[in-house]
Amino acid sequence: MYALVSWDFPSVAVASNGRIVVGAALISGGNLGYYTAYSDNGGSTWFGPYAVLRVRGGASRLVWSASGFHVFTINDSSSPLYTLEHYTSSDGVAWSQTTSIATNYPMPLKSAGISSLNGDLSFSNTPDAAASAGLGWVVAFPVSINNRNAINITTELGGGVTVNYTTGWLFT
């Protein structure tokens, strides 16, 4: 009999040398960590998985910038306050934790309480990340500010902004 292994929350990054790194959360029977695998031949052969962290991998994203591979993951062990952790790797195999991006922030409300013809607006705790030659990595993550949902955006080169509407999110 085979044991069921489940993966979720996948993301992919491609280095300038062509190395493809895929990251995903191991969720077989719980949130068991975030792992990566890599290919140097366009995806024909894969190596891994390699552990980025062995706990809390569900809400994680992977990206590549000129400084290497980066994983951003939510640490919810101090709920209701959260930390956005940052891990780096030059090769997608060996990972090191760096200074956290944000600490002790409240997660967004599950529902913004905004009803429309299309239903209620809900928020996830999952960060999103991308890379740009001019900005390095860019990570966006949801927060709650004064019981209102907002999105914090931080860049590798030091920029950042909070997108926050004091009267709620407006969609037409």
Image (cartoon, rainbow, N blue to C red):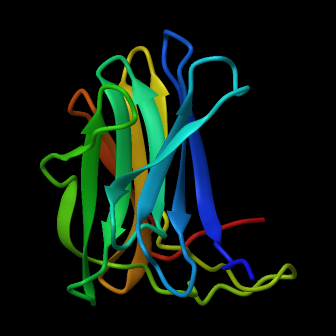
Q: Residue sitting at 58 percent across and 39 percent down?
A: 12
Q: Does residue 71 appear anywhere in the picture?
A: yes
Position of 133 with respect to 7 (left or right) is left
Check the image and name the residue furthest to the right: 117
Quadrant location of the C terminus in the rendered image: bottom right
Residue at image location 36% in from the left, 24% down from the top: 136
- Relative to the observer, which residue lies in front, 48 or 123? 48
Query: Is residue 158 or residue 170 the one in the foreground?
Result: 158
Q: Is residue 95 above or below residue 124?
A: above
Eyeballing the image, is 133 above or below 68? above
The structure residue drawn at horizontal position 57% and vertical position 70%, both measured from the top left corner, is: 169
The N terminus sits in image quarter = bottom right
Residue 164 is situated, as x and y percent measured from the top left of the image, at 41, 63
- Farthest-out residue, front: 1
Relative to 127, say whether 15 is above or below: above
Name the side, left or right, on which 65 lies relative to 113. left
Tell me where residue 128 appears, x and y as whole percent.
50, 51
Residue sitting at 59 percent across and 61 percent down?
A: 9
Q: Position of residue 15 (x, y in %)?
A: 49, 19
Above or below for 164 versus 105: above
Residue 82 appears left or right of 131: left
Quarter of image, res 88:
top left
